[in-house]
Image: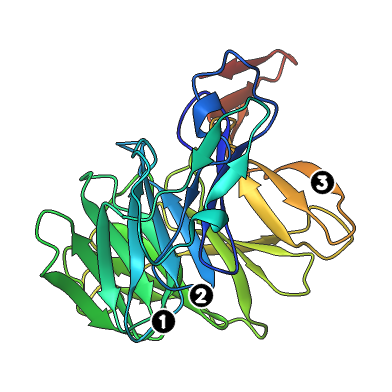
Amino acid sequence: PKYDPECLLAVGQANGRVVLTSLGQDHNSKCRDLIGKEFVPKHARQCNTLAWNPLDSNWLAAGLDKHRADFSVSVWDISSKYTPDVTVPMEKVRLSTGDNETSLVVTKPLYELGQNDACLSLCWLPRDQKLLLAGMHRNLAIFDLRNTNQKIFVNTKAVQGVTVDPHFHDRVASFFEGQVAIWDLRKFEKPVLTLTEQPKPLSKVAWCPTRTGLLATLTRDSNIIRLYDMQHTPTPIGDETEPTIIERSVQPCDNYITSFAWHPTSQNRMVVVTPNRTMSDFTVFERISLAWSPTTSLMWACSRQLYECTEEGKDSSLE
């Protein structure tokens, strides 16, 4: 979804085209002229991933399969006007609309990156509007759109699911099969941490937006979401530092989980979806720490609350 109060969606297709659509827009919507707009690459191939720019919401990055004569990363400006291209037949670029108007596709990207390679995952780096992190076929690459001829890259197999920690913008997670790698972009030569390898291939990793250093992972054919609490890990993680990570598992439902998403503002809350199209709203409860005082008062911490239970039976909650 576009980072905007109005729910504009981008859909990547098997032929590489990206189509803008929406959920329930009214006729007075600011985005109504964008619905149905298409962005077409020069050569057709699978679109693997999409990423909206969090700072400039008109920019949309698309990651495509490899083509020997084309780039695999395209950055589109959704406000661009139609640009004719002789390689795209006109009968294929017209879309019928309710009004007697013609919506034409855009064929010229704002930027093209990553030639002769496949792009499997993408994310924008929040610290700068023009920094794009891409999981290519054999490496992670940081593209600076101010100078597209240069890039920073590191060879690795962990090129899937790249995602930036929203609370620590230099920390990135990616994965390969059952292994998660944690990277520090300030020293990008190798992972600063690798998490315990899972017996099944991973399908998704995601940082919690409301909790510092909490990473959730999901493997295929599983009803378990594994959580890794890295909030007490020194940042940046030193080469000689043995990080302490609290690992736990939660089971939101009995069925296999297809995917999940953290709630952007409600603490520790997520939605999971199953293959039979069931959606479950789930809250991850914090570990509870107990402490006795010398005067026999009991205090415990849960989430952002401190609770105190006194001998007289009066309890209180402190923010």
Residue at 54 percent of width and 72 percent of height: 46
Residue topped by disc 1: 66
Q: Position of residue 318 (x, y in %)?
A: 54, 18
Q: Residues within 10 Å of mark 2 (few under 14, many from 20)?
A: some
Residue topped by disc 2: 45
Instruction: Nearest to the eye among marks 3 and 1: give it.
Output: 1
Q: Residues within 10 Å of mark 1 (few under 14, many from 20)?
A: many
Judge by depth and name the residue closer to the eye, 104 or 56: 104
As helix, strand or loop, the secondary structure at mark 1 comes to loop
Amino acid type, label 1: Lys
Residue at 52 percent of width and 38 percent of height: 103
Q: Are marks 2 and 1 in contact (CB under 8 Å)?
A: yes
Disc assigned to residue 8: none
Q: Earlier in the sequence, mark 2 or mark 3?
A: 2
Disc assigned to residue 279: 3
Residue at 30 percent of width and 62 percent of height: 133
Q: Earlier in the sequence, mark 2 or mark 1?
A: 2
Q: From mark 2 to mark 1, how far is it between C-alphas?
A: 8 Å
Amino acid type, label 3: Met
Q: Are marks 2 and 3 in contact (CB under 8 Å)?
A: no
Tell me if 14 is positioned left or right of 274 in this view: left
